Every structure is written in C-alpha cells, then in structure tokens.
Image (tube, coloured by chain):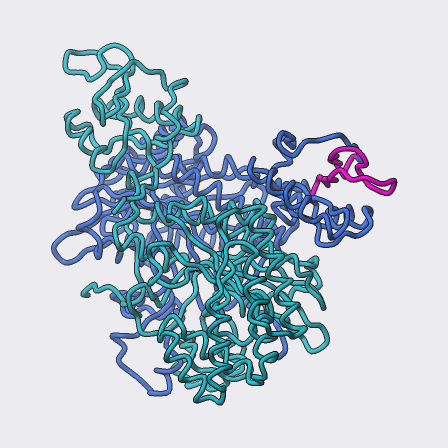
Chain colours: A blue, B cyan
Amino acid sequence: MKITPISGFPEFLPAQRIVEQHFLDVIRETFELHGFPSIETRAVEPVDRLLGKGGDADKEIYGVTRLADRSEQRHDSDAELGLHFDLTVPFARYVLEHAGHLTFPFRRHQIQKVWRGERPQEGRYREFTQADIDVVDVGELAPHFEAEMPLVIAEVFRKLPVGQMVIQVNNRKIPEGFYLGIGIDDVAGTLRVVDKLDKIGPAKVKDQLVEAGCTPEQADQCLALAAIRSEDLSFVEQVRALGVEHPTLDEGLEALAAVVRAGLDNAPGALVADLKIARGLDYYTGTVYETQLVGHESWGSFCSGGRYDSLASDGRTTYPGVGISIGVSRLLGLLIGKGLLTASRSTPACVLVAVNDEESRATSTQVATELRARGIPCEVAPKPAKFGKQIRYAERRGIPYVWFPGAAGDDAAAPGGDQVRDIRSGDQVDADATSWEPPEQDLRPQVIRVES
Amino acid sequence: MKITPISGFPEFLPAQRIVEQHFLDVIRETFELHGFPSIETRAVEPVDRLLGKGGDADKEIYGVTRLADRSEQRHDSDAELGLHFDLTVPFARYVLEHAGHLTFPFRRHQIQKVWRGERPQEGRYREFTQADIDVVDVGELAPHFEAEMPLVIAEVFRKLPVGQMVIQVNNRKIPEGFYLGIGIDDVAGTLRVVDKLDKIGPAKVKDQLVEAGCTPEQADQCLALAAIRSEDLSFVEQVRALGVEHPTLDEGLEALAAVVRAGLDNAPGALVADLKIARGLDYYTGTVYETQLVGHESWGSFCSGGRYDSLASDGRTTYPGVGISIGVSRLLGLLIGKGLLTASRSTPACVLVAVNDEESRATSTQVATELRARGIPCEVAPKPAKFGKQIRYAERRGIPYVWFPGAAGDDAAAPGGDQVRDIRSGDQVDADATSWEPPEQDLRPQVIRVES
C-alpha cells in the first residue's frame, strides 16, 4: 500500500513536536495562572448543531458515520454526527448541557484539534489545534472580563519565542454608534466593507461604501474612524475630534478605554486600540480582538475573538460570553515552516547511558533508574557498540551527555568509577548517578529562535 | 434544539478533568524521563489502511467525509478516510512515511484520542484516550527493549493514585515451544482457547481443547502451564518440572527471565510472570503484557501490549517493534465513575483576589499580576460583593485562599495593608503580593484517592 501524505493533515517530526509541546505547555500554564480550568469536549457534535440556525454550509464540515451504518444508507440527519470545526460551538453546547454542574461566571480553557474540509493552502489546515479561553455568565456578563482576556493572551505571547505580537482591540459599539451618528443605518453592511480595508485599500473601500448608499462625506468619515490607532488612550480624543455624537459611541469609547487602560497597567506595550478591527462575525457585540506578529503582518491574525451577548441560549436563559482563540497550528506551521523555530534536540533524553557490554546492561539500567528518580530524562544505549558509535548515537539525537558506567579493562571508557561526558565540549568528569545534575538549561530540550 | 449526551462520548466536568490532566501529566513526564519523545499522528487514515490486509470490518471504523462531497455520492474508496481506532496502525504508517527523517531504533510516545463505533457499555467508549510507548528498529529489534517497557509502565502506575497495579508478563515462545514439545501443532488455535481461561474456567478450556483435537493429557499439560505464576524467577523451575523440551520453549524462558529480572532489579513487586497471558492478537511474537488492578481484577487489563516482529513493512524493509498502551479513559472512567478519585478543587486558581469596589478593581488585578509573576494561579473576584459572598464564591470552587487588598474604611476586610485568608481554617494574616507563598500542596489542585 503506497504511503502518501494527506493534504491539509500535517504531522510533525519529533523535534518539531517538541516545539509544539513547548507552545502548548506555555499556553496551558498561562491559562491556568489566570484561573481558567481546562475542559475537553467530544470531537463530534450533531450536524444540525454544527450547521447552526442558518444551516450555513460554508463551514465545510466533516461528517462522521460508522462504516457499518453507511451501507444501510441511513438518512436520519438528526442522528448524524460531524467533527467540530471550532471550539466555540461545542463549548456553548457544553455549557447548556452541564449548566447545572457548573459555577457561573464560568471560566474555562480548551486546547483541542478541530477539523475543516477547506481547500488546503499555506498556513491553512484541515486538522489543526486551537487554544481558547472564554468566560460566560448567566443573563449578564460584567464588562471587566473584556479587559481581562487580552492580559492573558499578552502573557502567553510574552513567554513564547515568537517575537513581538501586538493585540489589536476595538469595540463594536464604536463603529456602530459612529455610523448611526453620521446617519448610516446599515451598520453590519458598512462594517463588512470597512473590514476589507487591509485587503483592498481605502480607495476601493470608499467606492464600495458609496455604491452601498453612503455619501462620499460619510464614506470619508468611516475611513477616518478606521484609520485611528493608538497604544494609549489618545484614540478617544482622536474620535472626539471627528465631531460625531451618539450614546452608543460613548459607551464603546468608555469600554475600549477600560480595556486599553488595563493593558497599560498590566501588560504595557502589548495592546493597541485599532479602530479598523471589525471581525467579520455577526455575533460579536462588544470588544473584538485580533493580533499581528510584528514583521509578519501579512500572515494575518493568529489570535482573535470578542464579546458575544448570546454565546448560548436554551430559550429561557441566555449566556453572554467573551472569548479569544489562539490558532496554534497556523502559528507553528508558519514559524516552523519558515525555519524560524527549532528544538535543541529530538528527544527529551538529557543523558545517554552507555553500555560496556550486553552482560553489564543491568548496571547501565541501574544508572538510568537512579538519574530518573531525580528527574533527569535518560535513555540506555541500544547496543554495546564502540564508544565512538554510542557517542554518535547521542549526537544524532542532540542528547548532550553520555554516561560511562565504570568498568575494568584498558578499553573501558571509564576505567575507574562512573564518568559523564558533555559531548559538545568533550569534557569528561567523574560522576555519581545519585548526585550528578546537568545544568538547568540542558535538562529539557530548548526551543530555539533562529534569527533570520 | 434539545441537548442530549451522545452515548459513548463522555465528557468530564472541570474537577474530573483535573484528575485526567494529572494522569496525563504523570504519564507524559514518565515517558519523557525514559527518553520517549512525543509524536502525534493525524486523526484520520485511509480506510484501506485501517481495515488492514484482511479487510477486517470488526474494528467498527468511523468513516469521515466532507458533507459537501457526500451529496456527490462519491465512491472512490481509495480516497476514503476514517478515524483511527488505535495508535498502532497510525504509528506504523508514520514510521514508513517518515523513515528517512527518523533515527532508529526509534522510540516514541503518543497520547491521543481514538474512536471506535462499538456498542457503548460500562468502561467502554466510542471516543477515548490511549497513551502508548513503542520502540521500533530496522530489520532486527534487540530483546532488551522487551524488558524496558514494563519498567516504564511500572513507574507510571507507582506515581498514579490508582492503588496497586500488577503487570503480568509472558512470552509467546513459551506456550508455542511447550505446545510443540507435547505434540500440539495448532499453536494459535490452542492459545486462543487457553486465553479464555479467566472467562470460562479450566474445565471448559479442557473440553474445548479436547474438542479441538488434543488428548486429555495434552490439555492437562496446557492447563498446568497456564497455571504457573511467579513474582520471581521460580516460574522457570516450575515449567521445567513439567518435563517438556523444545528449543523455542528454552528461548522463551530465557527471554521472560530477562524481563522479570529487570523488573526485580528496577521495579520490585511490579511484575509477575503469568503464563496464562496470551493476548488474542496474532501479531505478537515475543513478550506480551497485561495488567491487573489489585482489588479490581474483574475490570480487566488497563494496559496491554507486546512484541511484534513486523510492526510495519514497506515490502523491502521490515520494522519489528515492542509497545504497550495504557487505556487512560477506561481507567479514569471506572475510577472516577466509582467515586474513587476526585480533585481538591475545580479550578487551577489557588487564590481569589477580592475586589473592594469596582473602582479599585485595577488594584486587585495588580495583586493578581504580581502573584502570577511568581507562578501562583489566581483569579480576581467577578463582583465587588459583600466579602462573605466573595468567600463563598471561592468556597464553591475549592479555591483555598482569598486575598483582601488593603483599603481604608471600617467595613474594609483588610483595613491596613493586604491580608490573605485561608478559608478552610479562617486564619487571616498580613501579606505582601510580591513575596507571599502558599504551602506547596495548595499551589496546584490535588488529586485525592477516596478510600472505599
């Protein structure tokens, strides 16, 4: 049977996976530091729920059917299952299903694979990992949660070796109030056009706005609003200077100022108020988030989200929420793909314990057991080959130390007691398996940022 | 849309998920200590590969098709994808696909979900997590790897709060050589019958063996072999005492003795040579492993595996391997389901930072930022409610500490500087967010074994 990769379903080699594990560990650890417990939802949901109210087939859902059932030509779509294409739809269902067992406001993080049957292209996959945080409450959600989300994300990106990531924030109420204030009624339609700014430029946005019924003056005002960007609170003044008045605009400015202020206090330099950020999705009603990797702006946003007044509803109770999602696979696919990140070795092992001869393997295993008992990852050499060959085995995997158990005889690597060699420097010293420690930075594989 | 659970696709609540995370962390950490790097394979494989050479439909595979393609009634089964039902088939494919980029002998661990469309029943799921380790080599695999596997597993179970788990080991060559030595030619058929011993008992096994063509004396000999069990090397003497001679039997005894000896040296009490262990699967050719949770023997094996001479083959090169797989979901489903394990809290947060009033939320957030900078997970109270209410918020989640930022006024919880209260004891002391540390055991949620 011929083996060919399946397009859109990438797999990492062990060293690349070490980079991914580092990212996932930092993300999880930071989410937990901020008090977000983990949940996982099942990979499948009923197809009806995935399609949503509108039956939107754009989502490119993968259906899942037992092969045994398929031959029976079943067509009861009620029972039909599909793979989830994001973590928000399953989370909303989880909240409704388990509401009686959860405490609200409910915070959670969720790091899982999702699947989309889209046409694969660079940085887009059919199977990929997302890392989400959300807070939901019953009936009403306090606005301070909208300021909390980007602090968590800023900390994640400060700890990851990705370079500078800027979190762009806006509040939907700002364009909404502004558009209403200048007499534009079709807020959603206007937002959709302005959202294309980065792709098609201001001239074409203006054309499309005018086509859609705006006056040229209104279109210019929309563009002036979208051009406002500030790392501090000065965006408020700049909006005021455009001379538009509307209570929804006031609300939006106040809310965004609170988000930016929390950023200045707790994560200086990480946030920027950027009033062109719209997020296409209709369900956002307050703060919206996108991100830019400085120097790689064309790669687009790796982390996006916002506030929705109705994350979930069972008809009686509505659950408003705010959330943000990191596109882990897309970020890693680009950073690893462009050769910007690598790992110092392809195995967790810090030490290779050499084997003098097959008869004394038990001695080498004993050394390994003692090192492991003190948290030092190691591996026993697969063969009692010549020592040069055992060292090359370690070298090929990037294992920094080779341990030579003491042995008698002129050809022993460590004729007296045990010795350990740093194979990078060639330094070899006497060592005791019950007390030797590698330098802290050698204990685990390091993720290395390659400067381009 | 009505929400109903999907049978066989269980989901954990946050506190249960903390127990699962603890298990997965210990498993991964131990695998890494033993030098097994992680890989993940895509969730889907071509259906042809999942079905294997025999086209065995028993595996209850879930097929995966884009909904958009389904309407086109495609029938090119070449392109058809299915969800993997174990981690061995995808690993074998991964080895073949990436062989040029791997270093052999290749060790890896893999912790992922798998899916089987079986009829759901207690402790059996349609979506579940497996944790596997395997070593594969090119052409030949050194036998010492068969002794290494159970040492890793013994360490995992020593560190997990599951009670005593015994690893039962056997070597396929022992029954094979023994059966040949007493004149039974149908080794596989005889093994299959003997494998039913625990289910149907020795009398029925004897009947079935005789039905299959054994003499009553041969059947008795098979049962005598299967009854042998020893924690030390005495099983060798016991087999010898049965007076059967065959070179394959000698090989098997020597190999199993090496496995048991490594266990005695490095994980005393964890292994038992148990000569009735056969593992139904035909591809095992050497050591086989099963496990028993002492006191819960009827739950069956939670961790099984063995050696296979041909894990993978591309026609020219054969890759022998040895591996073992922990059924994490099945183990947790039973332990959590029977109420034997729980977590000390439902959130990673160790501290709830109280909020005096909405205006001073920034002060509370600053405290949280300082605690987090020193690795202390915390959450800021969602509302500036009465302090009793804020304490109850922490209590309901099991958060052990509430932090009161200093505030002026008679009704302040901490009228001077900051104070922190252990809400279990009620002790409240002055504290500084830049230096206060919780006791080590409070920093992370604890997994608690409930004695029944």
Identify the residue at horizontal 43%, vertical 61% (top origin): B113
Q: Residue at x 51, y 45 (%)?
A: B29
Q: Which residues are magenta?
A: A399-425
B165 to the left or right of A445: left
When the figure is inspected, residue B379 is found, relative to residue B249, above or below; the finding is above
**Foreground pick, B109 / B81:** B109
Residue drawn at the location 62% of the way across and 67% of the way down: B252
- In this rendering, the answer to whether A62 lies above or below B420 is below
Q: Is residue A201 visible?
A: no
Q: Is residue A163 left or right of residue A402?
A: left
Q: Is residue A420 magenta?
A: yes
In magenta stretch: residue A400: yes
Left or right of residue B444: residue A161: right
Relative to A94, residue A233 above or below: above
The picture quadrant where one finds residue B383 is top left
Compared across the picture, whether A311 is left or right of A235 comes to left
- Rendered location of residue A145, percent (x, y): 29, 37
Residue A363 lies in quadrant = top right
Q: Main secondary structure of the magenta part?
A: loop
Give the image location of residue A445, x and y in percent: 62, 42
Residue A213 or residue B354, whichever sits in front: B354
State the residue in front, A33 or A320: A33
Does residue A29 appear in the picture of this structure? yes
Percent position of residue A177, x then y: 26, 43
Between B201 and A19, the one lying in front of the other is B201
| Above or below for A91 versus A435 | below
Where's residue B112, x and y in %? 46, 59
